[in-house]
Amino acid sequence: MAITLYASFLPHDDPDACAAFYRDLLGFEVRGDVGYDGLRWITVGPVGQPDTSLVLEPPALGPGITDTERRTVVEMMAKGTYAALVLATDDLDGVFARLLDWDAEIVQEPTEQPHGVRDCAVRDPAGNLIRIQEQRRTGESAHRETTPR
């Protein structure tokens, strides 16, 4: 039995700004843009990975969500504490330079983490935390994880 990640969901409060962030800055392709009753769901994904998608959706629309819960979600999005995503790249410095050129909200510059990952963090236009880690050769990451500091 094989299980793969097919789609994940992040809330947006500005579909055009979020679509531009993932498409124009991160290089994802837009795979779908569905509108209904004044709301939009935008499906994006990494080029060359057609089986992995990210759906940018209006926040807190589930049928069981109360008005109080909906307000809480919107407040958490505004603070940047509601949702997160981890991406990987083989050129972290290049991606970070693009983030700076884009004037993205930088949370953390590229940093070597104690657990052996080098990454940076940024917020998308909806406030979602996006961590981008550097992909490393297998031996390099294994060595860093097992070497005491």
Image: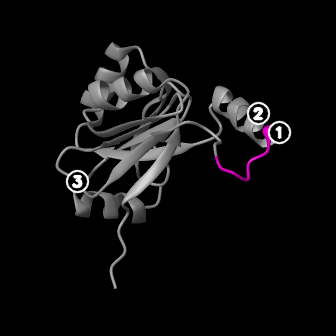
Residue 94 image point, x, y percent: 24, 28
Numbered disc 3: secondary structure: loop
Q: Measure how far apart labels 3 and 1 are at the Cα level.
A: 37 Å
Q: From the viewer's perspective, is residue 125 above or below residue 142?
A: above
Q: Quadrant of residue 45?
A: top left
Numbered disc 1: secondary structure: helix
Q: Which residue is mark 2?
A: 71
Tell me which label, 3 or 1, sits earlier in the chain.
Answer: 3
Q: Identify the residue at the far bottom of this view.
A: 1
Query: Which mark is drawn over residue 42?
Result: none
Q: Measure how far apart labels 2 and 3 are at the Cα level.
A: 34 Å
Q: Identify the residue at the far left of this view.
A: 48
Screen quadrant of the N terminus = bottom left
Residue 19 image point, x, y percent: 37, 28
- For the record, the magenta segment spans 62-67
Q: Which residue is mark 1?
A: 68
Residue 119 image point, x, y percent: 40, 40
Residue 63 included in the magenta stretch of the image: yes
Q: Residue at 46%, 60% (x, y): give it.
A: 148
Residue 79 horizontal side relative to residue 117, left or right: right
Query: Which mark is drawn over residue 50?
Result: 3
